[in-house]
Image (cartoon, helix red, strand yellow):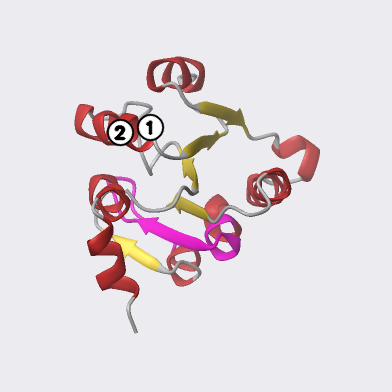
Amino acid sequence: MGESVIIIFDLNGTIATDGIIKDSTKKRIKELRKYHEIFILSADTFGTLKDIEEELGIKGIKVDKEKYGSEKIAKNEILKEIREKYKNEKIIAFGNGANDELLLKNADLGICVLGDEGTWTKTLLNSDIVVKNIDDGLDLILKEKRLKATIRE
């Protein structure tokens, strides 16, 4: 495994569909957490964030849109806070929706997941890489030669 990075996930539409994460995705996230610090950002639409956080052994952060006026801005502010705490770490962010646009734009590597919920076009345009599903995106990190092949110029 290469150097450690910070990984930030949007929950619904990115790693979960209707609040449920597939077993194949859980397995990959559990493997990644051995080497990387992982956060899930969510408005917790389905009320599953706490259970997912406990099951996967990673940090869930509930997005407070009231504090910042929108989920998009709130996620970007959380990204800034994480960047400040982990100054020397690269940040990879995964998302799909309108509220992930700034998160993917401002991460060191923004990965847009097409997934079952579809993708907000502006988020796609502000990402660095697009994958057809979350497992393919996670495999870019787990099998780092794939990522190197994708970003090589």
Amino acid carrying mark 1 in the image: Lys
The 10 Å Cα crowd at callout 2, few under 14, some 14 to 19, many 20 or more, is some
Please determine whether, in this image, residue 129 is positioned above or below residue 72: below
Q: Residue at x 54, y 27 (%)?
A: 59
**Could you classify mark 1 by the number of other residues whose Cα lies within 10 Å: few (under 14), some (14-19), or many (20 or more)?**
few
Query: 133 or 98: nearer the eye?
Result: 133
x%, y% of residue 108? 54, 63
Q: Please, is residue 132 above or below residue 9 in the view?
A: below
In the picture of the structure, the residue carrying the numbered disc 1 is 34
Residue 138, image x, y percentages: 30, 47
Q: Circle 2 sits on which residue?
A: 31
Q: Is residue 11 above or below residue 125?
A: above
Given residues 40 and 96, the one toward you in this image is 40
Residue 55 sits above or below residue 104 on the image:
above
> Quick one: 87 or 17, which is closer to the camera?
87
Which of the 4 quarters of the picture holds residue 81? top right
- Number of marks: 2
Q: Which span is picked out in magenta?
A: 103-120
> In x, y percent, where is residue 11?
44, 36
Q: In this view, does 58 lie to the left or right of 129?
A: right
89 relative position to 123: left or right = right
Which element type, helix, strand or loop, lies under badge 2? helix
Helix, strand or loop at label 1? It is: loop
Question: Is 75 inside the magenta-drawn segment?
Answer: no
Do labels 1 and 2 touch, CB within 8 Å? yes
Mark pair 1, 2: CA separation: 6 Å
